[in-house]
Amino acid sequence: MASEPDLNAPAVHGNPFEAYRQLRESDPVHWSDAFKGWCLYRHADVQTALGHPAFSSKRLDTFRRLTPPDRAAQVAEAFETLERWVLFQDGEAHHRQRRLFGHGFAPGAIRLMLPKIEAVADELIRGLATRPGFDAAAEFAIPFPVTVIADLFAVESGDRLRVQHWSDDIATFLTSIPIPAEACDRIGPTLRDLASTMAAVVAERRRHPRGEFIDELIRAGEDGTVLETADLMANFSVLLLAGNETTRNLIGNGIHLLLQHPDVLEQVRGDEGLWDHVVLEILRYRSPIQMISRLVVEEVELGGKRMKPGDQVFCMLGAANHDPEVFPDPERFDLRRANASDHLAFGAGPHFCVGYALALAEGRIALRRLFETFPGLRADPARPAEFLPITRLMGFTHLPVVTGA
Ligand code: HEM
């Protein structure tokens, strides 16, 4: 077996594709000592695992093990909320939770959100329009989805910064290995602040519903049952994490790729209908979530390897999306790729992303508005872009650009 390339090495952040290729070719279902679990590098294996009942999403114990022992009391309440998250359920419990999002994310509901998403793009761009340059990650891609979500949650515009802080604290808690002590100390107060702010919004909307996203969430499922407050709060917090950390990276990765591929940008500019397609290829080429995990709950064989109950499995979405068996010439960013929509960036199987249509709309609107407003946009030659230093995710912390105006 080949020695294992280090996917956590700083040099690999933002460009793990050569390491993925080596692993896919030498040992596609690989026991990783670094990850202490199986890593799946082929598209077919990832798709199988995400749809197979032997691979469970009830994996909160892995996060519990990452908590410093002296912080167990501080995180107990947070884990009660996480226990209710749709992301960490299986079977019937999962199905019940997931139904709650059905109406709010239906295509018709997303169409109604488009004017608000366009207004968010315009507002952010107005703030940048007079500047010779700006940070397209910190000042555009990162605030964009959080502002959209704050709107969906119907919080006052003065509270948007708090929504950003909630989102950041939840993300640090769930994406750091191990979880830092300060993140453990912050998560309880953060979730309480979220609950008290949202309780006021929910009380108001229960009195005066407006038929918007939040009203659908409050009125759970088709039967109109009113959700328990704790479930509602869990749903708000899962949407913050699932909708922000991901979409910001779709937008940041998209800006970077289009600046690197002016020929593609030129083609998209010439044909409005291509924006949807380019967003799919961005998701395939640089998937915002590079890996998701599962827990083996019954003995199973995959790719000739026997897996035992209790084993962790990492589905390497970013590697699957560069599998040449499915995507010929995978390292080519190809606007004309006929099967770009076969990417697994939104997962697969029962947990397939509920917010995918919203994410596609946000990506399309953000990129199109930005490149239309700044036709001369290019990377700032004096300030390098900085990749997010997290192996599970792919995106930018800083993306300096100049407008050329
Ligand atoms: C480019 C943006 C996005 C990407 C790449 C993405 C990716 C994913 C992936 C890979 C999963 C599956 C996780 C698993 O199987 O463990 C997922 C689930 C989910 N996503 Fe997204 N997502 C994006 C945007 C959004 C948005 C905008 C929302 C809502 C505001 C959202 C809400 C959710 C929820 C609630 C789940 C859990 C579904 C379930 O467990 O059944 N996502 N997403």
Image: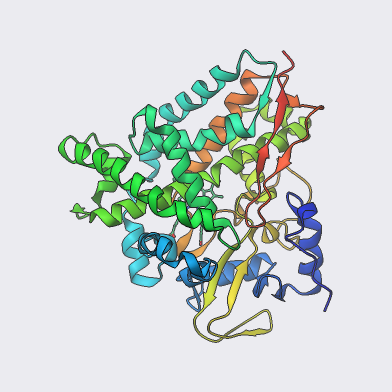
Residue shown at 76%/68% (left/top)? 24
Quadrant of the snapshot with the N terminus = bottom right
Give residue 305's quadrant in the image.
bottom right
In the picture, the quarter occupied by the C terminus is top right
Place of residue 285 in the rendered image (x, y in percent of width and height, measured from the top left):
70, 48
In the image, is residue 205 above or below residue 310?
Answer: above
Report whether 13 appears left or right of 119: right
In the rendered structure, the answer to whether residue 271 lies left or right of residue 348 reads: right
Q: Residue at x 54, y 17 (%)?
A: 126
Q: Position of residue 228 (x, y in %)?
A: 23, 56
Residue 356 visible in the picture:
no
| Residue at the limit of the structure toward the left, as seen here | 207
Is residue 19 left or right of 192 when viewed as pictured?
A: right
Tell me the residue at 31%/40% (across/down): 197
Q: Give x and y (percent) for residue 366.
A: 56, 31
Q: Residue at x 49, y 64 (%)?
A: 349
